[in-house]
């Protein structure tokens, strides 16, 4: 009974999480104007999504922002994790504490604080993309740090020291010895940073230029309006985002499984 009860609970939780997404996916392939009303099969929402210049500009702008912010956040988060790992214990504790604050802090506080700091204190205009990019990097970098740090803990620290003893420079040993060992954590952090940037609303609201919209800010504004065609096209956009995230998650799990199998095989050879 315990086994069946546990399985039932897992199934119910999965239904609770994924049923709304599945319903949205089904309705994205219909001509219904509202969820809950019957409609016929149609790809009109996808045609509208890719042929409306306003939507296309919003999507590509959001993707470019997510990739750029994730790239910068991955560099900063990875370097921060490496520095923390090799730092003394008291500095390591301090860095971990500082990194936890943006993670725990509410996004609305982070966004508003960055806006005040950059616009009011440093005088950077909100008409530029500088506050928006800095805000998203600040939002994403701590999560990259948290993804990379456990991989450093799993790495044998003597490998880096052996590379130095054999004549490698610190930068060469970092690139050729440390980074390959933690690359799965770096890629996980990069993927998480992209997801956080795509999903962010509050930081973008306070830091973006008035003429620019991310997917989150555009969706909120569109749902308040009366443009039914735009609203239903966003169903298609949500479906595409979910399928891309699902594909990336499966690919990363497969890569991680392959890396673990190779590590086990090497360990067996040594034994």
Image (cartoon, rainbow, N blue to C red):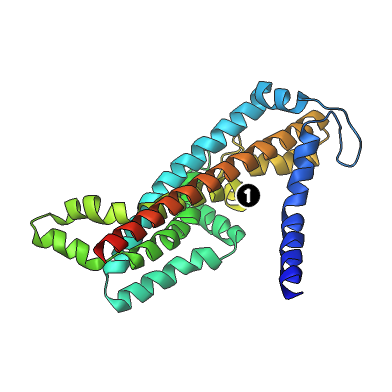
Q: Say whether residue 22 is left or right of residue 244.
A: right
Q: Quadrant of residue 45?
A: top right
Q: Say whether residue 120 is left or right of residue 165.
A: right
Quadrant of the image containing the N terminus: bottom right
Rendered position, 125 above or below 120: above
Element marked by disc 1:
loop
Q: Quadrant of residue 93?
A: bottom left
Rendered position, 91 above or below 251: below
Percent coordinates x, y for residue 23 in the rendering = 79, 43
Percent coordinates x, y for residue 19 in the rendering = 77, 50
The answer to which of 245 and 66 lies nearer the viewer is 245
The answer to which of 215 and 43 lies nearer the viewer is 43
Percent coordinates x, y for residue 189 in the rendering = 45, 53
Percent coordinates x, y for residue 127 in the rendering = 53, 38
Identify the residue under disc 1: 201
Structural crowding at the residue carrying mark 1, measured as other residues with C-alpha within 10 Å and reported as few (<14), some (14–19) or many (≥20) = many
Q: Say whether residue 149 is left or right of residue 126.
A: left
Quadrant of the image containing the C terminus: bottom left
Quick check: can you spot residue 123? no
Rendered position, 220 above or below 260: above
Name the residue rendered at 49%, 68% in the picture. 101
């Amino acid at each position: 009974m315990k086994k069946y009860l546990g399985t039932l609970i897992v199934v119910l939780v999965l239904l609770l999480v994924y049923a709304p997404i599945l319903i949205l996916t089904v309705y994205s392939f219909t001509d219904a104007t509202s969820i809950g009303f019957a409609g016929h099969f149609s790809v009109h929402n996808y045609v509208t999504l890719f042929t409306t210049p306003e939507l296309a500009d919003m999507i590509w702008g959001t993707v470019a922002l997510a990739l750029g912010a994730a790239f910068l956040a991955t560099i900063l988060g990875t370097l921060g994790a490496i520095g923390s790992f090799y730092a003394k214990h008291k500095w390591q504790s301090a860095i971990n504490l500082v990194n936890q604050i943006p993670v725990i802090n509410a996004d609305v506080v982070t966004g508003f604080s960055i806006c005040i700091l950059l616009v009011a204190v440093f005088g950077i205009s909100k008409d530029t993309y500088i506050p928006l990019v800095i805000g998203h990097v600040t939002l994403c970098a701590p999560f990259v740090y948290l993804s990379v740090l456990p991989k450093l803990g799993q790495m044998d620290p003597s490998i880096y020291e052996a590379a130095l003893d054999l004549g490698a420079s610190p930068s060469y040993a970092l690139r050729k010895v440390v980074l390959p060992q933690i690359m799965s954590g770096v890629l996980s952090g990069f993927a998480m940073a992209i997801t956080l940037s795509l999903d962010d609303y509050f930081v973008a609201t306070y830091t973006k230029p008035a003429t620019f919209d991310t997917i989150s800010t555009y969706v909120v504004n569109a749902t308040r309006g009366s443009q039914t065609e735009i609203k239903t096209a966003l169903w298609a956009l949500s479906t595409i985002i979910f399928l891309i995230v699902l594909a990336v998650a499966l690919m990363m799990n497969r890569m991680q499984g392959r890396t673990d199998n190779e590590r086990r095989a090497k360990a067996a050879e040594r034994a």
